[in-house]
Amino acid sequence: MEPLTNKKKVLAQKPLTFAERMYLPAIAKGLTITMSHFFKKQATIRYPEEEREFSTNFRGMHSLKRDEEGRERCTACGLCALSCPAEAITMIAAERKPEEKAIYREEKYAAVYEINMLRCIFCGLCEEACPKEAIYLDGPIVPADYLRKDFIYGKDKLVEAPLEQK
Amino acid sequence: MEIAFVIEKFVLVAIIFGISLVIAMYSTYAERKVAAFLQDRLGPDRAGPFGILQPLADGLKMFMKEEIVPTNSSKWLFMVGPGLAMLTACIGTAVIPWGSPIAIGDRIIPLQVTDINVGVLYIFGVVSLGVYGVMIGGWASNNKYSLLSAIRAASQNISYEIAMGLSVIALLLVTNSMSLKEIVEQQHGWHWNVLYQPLGFIIFIVCSFAETNRAPFDLPECETELIGGYHTEYSSMKLGFYLFAEYINMFVSSAVMATLYWGGYNYPGMDWVLTQVGPTIAPVIGVIVLFAKIFAFIFFFMWVRWTIPRFRYDQLMHLGWKMLIPLAIANVIITGLVIAYFEKF
């Protein structure tokens, strides 16, 4: 029968030659290989002190964006929470008062916006779902912590700094 | 016995004991560093600069850990096992000549604890006693698997001791002496035994790997096949003693290899240094040379460990009994014939 592909490779188990049965040449070869690695550049990055450079499309910690006037973009529509496959996002919406016009962009805003970083899988679907371009996963790696409750990030950690502070 | 002699020996023993413990301690650090470098990593670097305090941290951890003695174990023997392993590892250093006699003032002090005329036999006796540590440890644990591993380890050690002994017999034919001191002095300058006994040296070094339970012959402590090996039931510093004894053994066998085959404290141009610099400094250089050789061997032990995969047990026995022993016997016969030829004609 004609073979479907020409990838087939016939293996023959030849008896070992005398040099191969001696072990020592093979051992010497192995030793030279490991020795060459001794002088190679180490791949280790000393993490807390040094940080690895990420690719431009790396998805890190979330941030809630502000518009050009410094108002929060999020209108608490809930699409991000809906699109989240890990159900990591919870929010409570509230209505804007007249004196808060400079803080929130539209009539509705998120009074509470929480992301559970232990549940988040950094898939980026919230980013895609957001119609207001309010959430981006452009931050660094989420830092380690000791308590589970400290991984629930509220608006204090998520909303980016006001314009004048930047 | 004069009092100066006693003090001199006491100081020497204390120094050698201290040195071998420190070297064993830092071998654990060096092992991790060498392993890391051979695998393109950095290794321990958190405790102190370059991680040099790592052995202290490891030791502290070992002492702080909970100590568990199995309920139905033989408690006394359970404690004796690791101690015996340490003891037999440590006393091997007694007959190794660390340098040519050093002259301090009028006194000439030999840098060797004792020069017994059966030094090689002493080393072999001590090394074979090391099996007791393993065997008692495995037996006292009251654990079938530990006992099986202990038997395995013991039979490995005994098997390779035969080939090791035979390779040394060929060496003794050449040197005509069993005193390590004399063997070293015969190798003065460039007459290192490895040049006369290359095959014997290869057999010897392979057997040393097996005797010290180092990779590729580290079957006594294979995690995957036999849970942990003969020391499965050991915890905290008792386990630490077993592991530590392995490193001391490595140091001692490196020293023995350097002494028997690689000229000990001899180095080319020794006489010139002795006449030019004087009888106090020259032996010190010799000691440094010997330690350089020992460190090279320790590095070699580690280098091999991180290169060659572990043997299967039947392969190990095959290599020991069917390859190394016949080779060693052939080496003895050839050496004997060559010596007989040169003495007759």
Image (tube, helix red, strand yellow):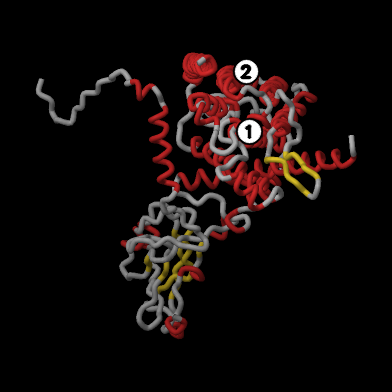
Q: Nearer the viewer, residue A98 or A130?
A: A130
Q: Secondary structure at mark 2?
A: helix
- Give the residue type that dot 2 points to: Ile
Quarter of the rendering occupied by the N terminus of chain B: top right
Q: Residue at x 38, y 30 (%)?
A: A25
Horizontally, is B105 left or right of B301 in the view?
Answer: right
Q: Residue at x 53, y 14 (%)?
A: B344
Quarter of the image where one finds residue B291: top right
First in sequence, mark 1 or 2: give its number.
Answer: 2
Where in the figure is residue B11, as x and y percent of width and height?
80, 43
Where in the figure is residue A161, as x and y percent of width and height?
46, 77
Quarter of the image where one finds residue B136: top right
Q: Residue at x 56, y 58 (%)?
A: A145
Mark 1 crowd level (few <14, some 14–19, many ≥20, 10 Å Cα): many
Check the image and report above or below for B230 versus B100.
above
Q: Is residue B21 visible?
A: yes
